[in-house]
Every structure is written in structure tokens, then in C-alpha cells.
Amino acid sequence: MEHTLKVIGHVHTDFPTKFGIPRQSGLVEELEGQIVFLPEYSREEAFRGLEGFSHIWLIWQFSQAVREDWSPTVRPPRLGGNRRLGVFATRSPYRPNPLGLSCVRLVGIERHPALGTVLHIRGADLMDGTPIYDIKPYLPYSDSRADAQGGFGAERLGYSLQVVISDELSARVPSEKRDALVKLLSEDPRPSYQDDPERVYGFFFGNQEICFKVTEGVLTVTDVKEGAQRKQSGF
């Protein structure tokens, strides 16, 4: 039996492309985003009571990874791309159903005059324009498990890079986004299997392209360029 999921809205973030997005939600709490709902689902009464919750679950679509087929094993980037594991033991986007699950902080519920209900969130790991299928409140008493084991995902726990960015380049980044950018860079945006100290990497963050190199655990921002392509989100 097949069921059709309905898109209820879209998330808007500072990531117009996949590269640079945090590997999991909540890793960069400073990142801000908004969820804009389709008119049918933006009715104010549908969100009654949500203001009492600090966090919400997002169920969404890996819209850039939709495929007709699937593989029972994948190569997790966290393991360097050299080891195959079962797809159901990973959070790979290449799944029988391209569904993602993220826990984000709910910082505000706005009644926008043109867009209807808009949720303001922090800590999202989603690309700009990602379709949202559902939201659910996070329940601390049942959703948090102190004795949970992290499997291979805990192997790089606590890993971070030192970030060096000059005052000149930092000044090109909007002041309200600087802390988020530094935290994002410290999480190492590169694929785990790439470690070329001479290579200059780059990703789009908001309206800018951030260029950087990594040498011996130090990430140095080499340039901040204007001109990233943005979707029209209304914000």
C-alpha cells in the first residue's frame, strides 16, 4: 500500500547549496531559519499551544537526494567514505524514502500579514527551500534518553577546528551571523575523506561565499565573496 505525503511548508535558511550544512541539527545553535507554511496549513489555530514548547521535531524531504532506486549499504562520510554500513544504521539521505528528521529550537511564532504563520527556529541542518512534511513538539521526558549509545556516530564527538578569520574578512559578514559562521566552520564543513592542506574550499552562507583552507587542525578563512544565489523566501 502506498501513501502520499503532503508538503505543508518549506524551511528557509542561509544555505542555498548542500555543502557547508551542519551534519546534524543542534550542532550550530546560532543558525537561524524560518518555516513558511502553505496557505492551507498556516491557519493560526493549527499552532495553538505550540508556544509552550522550546524545541520541535521536523520531518522533511531530502529533496536533492530523491532516487527511484536504493542501496542496502552506504558509505558514511563520518567514516571517511571507506566503510560500508547498512542504510538503516546511518542518516544517509539515500534511503528507500528520502525522509529527514531534525530537532530544532523554536524561538518564535509570528503571524505574518502576507505569509500567515511563520515559525522562527535555530539549529537547523537543512538547505534553503527544503520541503517540510510535519512538525511535532519535542517532549523531554520521552525524547531524551540519558543511557542511549551513539554507535559509530560518537567516534568524532568533541572534534573541532580552530578558526582563524581576519578582522577585514569578518567585517564582511553581517554582525548577527558572525558567531554562527565561526561555530559552523569549527565543525569542519569538509567531507571527512578530504584533507588536502593546499586546497581552498568554499560554500555559500547567506549572500556570501566563504572560502577557507585547513592545515593541521586550523581552519583559515581566505576570502569572503559577495554574490551567492538566494531563493526568494520573503525574509
Image (cartoon, rainbow, N blue to C red):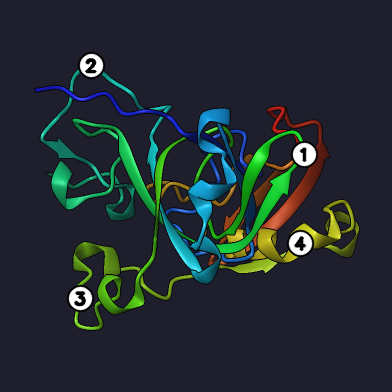
The quarter holding residue 36 reads top right
- Mark 2: amino acid: Glu
The quarter holding residue 221 reads bottom right
- Label 4 or label 1, whichever comes before in sequence order: 1
Label annotation for residue 68: 2
Q: Which residue is identified by label 4? A: 178
Q: Which residue is identified by label 1? A: 113
Residue at image coords 58%, 65%: 186
- Mark 1: amino acid: Pro
Q: Which residue is identified by label 3? A: 148
Q: Secondary structure at mark 3?
A: loop
- Mark 3: amino acid: Ala
x then y, percent, for residue 52: 52, 70
- Mark 4: amino acid: Arg
Q: Name the one closer to the observer, 62 or 23.
A: 62
- Label 3 or label 1, whichever comes before in sequence order: 1
Whether residue 84 can be seen here: no
- Label 2 or label 1, whichever comes before in sequence order: 2
Q: Nearer the viewer, mark 4 or mark 3?
A: 3
x then y, percent, for residue 54: 51, 70
- Label 3 or label 2, whichever comes before in sequence order: 2
Whether residue 5 can be seen here: yes
Q: Is residue 13 above or below residue 156?
A: above
The quarter holding residue 71 reads top left
Residue at image coords 17%, 26%: 70
Q: Is residue 140 above or below residue 82?
A: below
Q: Residues within 10 Å of mark 4 (few under 14, many from 20)?
A: some
Q: Quadrant of the N terminus?
A: top left
- Label 4 or label 2, whichever comes before in sequence order: 2
Q: Residues within 10 Å of mark 3 (few under 14, many from 20)?
A: few
Q: CA distance from mark 4 to mark 1?
A: 30 Å
